[in-house]
Amino acid sequence: MAQRNVYSSKDEPEDAQSPEEVLHSVMQELEALHQNVKGQLNQDITRLQTEKNHLIEDIEDLREQYRKLQSQQMESLSGRYIQQQQLWLKQLAQVLAHNLQDLLVQRFNELSANSGHSVSSPIPSGEFPIPLPPSNYDERASQLLAALDERIDRSFQMLEQDLSSYESELSVRLNNMQTLERQGEELLQNLVNRIREELEEEEEEYVENPFDAQDSYPEESTNSVNSVRAQVLPPTPAPRPQESVPESSSVPSPATAKAPSQVQVGLVLALSSAVVLSLFNVCLRILIKSKNPRMIFGVFELEGVVTRGFGNSLLILLMRLIVVMALMPILATFLYPSVWKDIRRLFESGDRALWGKVLGSAFFLFLSQVLIYLAIGNIPAGIAITIFFIYPIVTVLGSWILFGSRPSTVGFWAMLGITAGLILAGSPSFAAPAPDGGNVGVGVTAALASGITFAGYVLLTQMAAGKLHPIPFSLVNFAAIFVFSSLSLWVPLSENFSPKIDQNVWPGLILGGVVLGVLTLFSYLLNNFAIRFAGAALASVIGTLGPAMTALFGFLIINEKLQPVAILGMAVVTLSVAAMSVERIVAPQKKAG
């Protein structure tokens, strides 16, 4: 099935007289905006990297100065402490010597006076006489030494007390310095961490995702990949909590910023894309053989090219992808000139998690495509596409489990409506055999399995949203599906699953692949410009008409009639899925209000 790429664009042409002029003006302005934003972002990145280097150098200088000041302070304190101790010891020695000299002079004078050998004049201070020793010299000397020893003990005790008090004061000051040092280190570390986090956030914002920051990539990526292939409506994407960016109330939403004329042109393009998708489904139905030749527009009969089956579905998908891969690179370069830079950056990044999500989503989409082809070959295309719309239910439940995005009341009612519509749409198929000889059980089961596998593809796409632009993402997905299809046909399959092709039908198969591939790319292009003019949400609402339009074109082209109960179920499914899409438009406005 064909699918559309959906992504929002903020810059639109101011006015347009015709779609061709509007398209030409939009492309010129988008290219100018791209070059301008790219130059500004490169300048900002260079400036931020320069400031980051300067900040790192300043921080290293501050740390070095801090270490030098700390060492100098410690050396200064240690030097002053030693000098003060030496000064105290010198003063202490001088005091002790002076006191000892005075005491000895006094004692010698007393001894001289008592012994009758005192001199005619007192002994001057600072001189040491040599008197004659008295008879009790030993006793006096012992008393003198005891008094001297007591005086010295008292002096040493006082000195010890002074040293203890100074040591305790110095210890307190050192502890305070260590506390201040730890606080300074913590403050400096917090400052460095905050600067590093801010720089890393800015670098990630500008370098890892160098696209327009106002583009809603999580929603855009999901919408684009949901619309380009066999589906008509992109599901409601579950926002990732860790990547949610608060929107400024002063910035108008894309829906309100677009002119009415632009919205009208976008709605016409979205409707045209839905028409092309419906024609794709009917052409696929015509390509598969039926029990009786199909009457085209009631004018001429046309037999199918290949029989229904799993292997033939793989072959049809491969033929379609050959045309898509031949033209898609040209179309992708036209829509997004930086597509090859983004793909090269994806290969050089070595991000295994992102590659796993991209390849996993492509594998689920590959299975979904093969199964929906198998379903369309066995039951009417309108019924198959309607049953396929079980994927919004699986997607919403998976988003609830994986992302914690609990559906609203409208979402729950919409899921109940989709379930009831699927039962109503599928029940008539089991009541009567398929009109073209198909297997109803296989068709319904394949349609359900296609919707479930497509839901897995959508969930993986949501996980990778915001890391890769939608157009490079779609191109990589197409290439991966092409590889999966080729490998599946190269691997030997059992007889029930292997392709069964008559050699005479190859020209018709090649022509059918070309038609399907061209319709795929045409729908892709229409849907891209529809999103640029009208926005993703409005385009998705138009996409809900897919099952109804497929059934309508099936009736007009190949006279494929549906029972009233099936039409009622199709209408219920369409309205329920449309309610989900409308809720996506209304919910952000309620939050903003």
Image: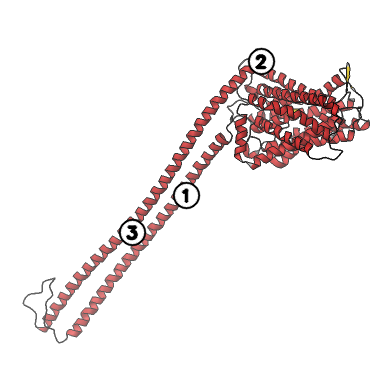
- Above or below, 83 against 502 in this view is below
Q: From mark 2 to mark 1, how far is it between C-alphas? A: 63 Å
The residue tagged 3 is: 78
Choose the circle earlier in sequence order: 2 or 1.
2
Inspect the image, locate mark 2, and give the three-letter code of the amino acid beneath it: Glu
Residue 35 coordinates in the image, percent (x, y): 55, 25
The residue tagged 1 is: 186
Residue 564 coordinates in the image, percent (x, y): 89, 25
Quarter where residue 327 is shown: top right
Residue 384 relative to residue 104: left or right? right
Residue in front for this viewpoint, 520 or 318: 318
Inspect the image, locate mark 1, and give the three-letter code of the amino acid beneath it: Glu
Choose the circle earlier in sequence order: 1 or 3.
3
Quarter where residue 86 is shown: bottom left
Which callout, 2 or 1, points to the residue nearer the camera? Answer: 2
Inspect the image, locate mark 3, and give the three-letter code of the amino acid beneath it: Ser
The residue tagged 2 is: 20
Label 1 neighbour load within 10 Å: few <14, some 14-19, many 20+: few
- Above or below, 31 against 356 in this view is above
Label 3 neighbour load within 10 Å: few <14, some 14-19, many 20+: few
**Residue at the outermost top position:** 17
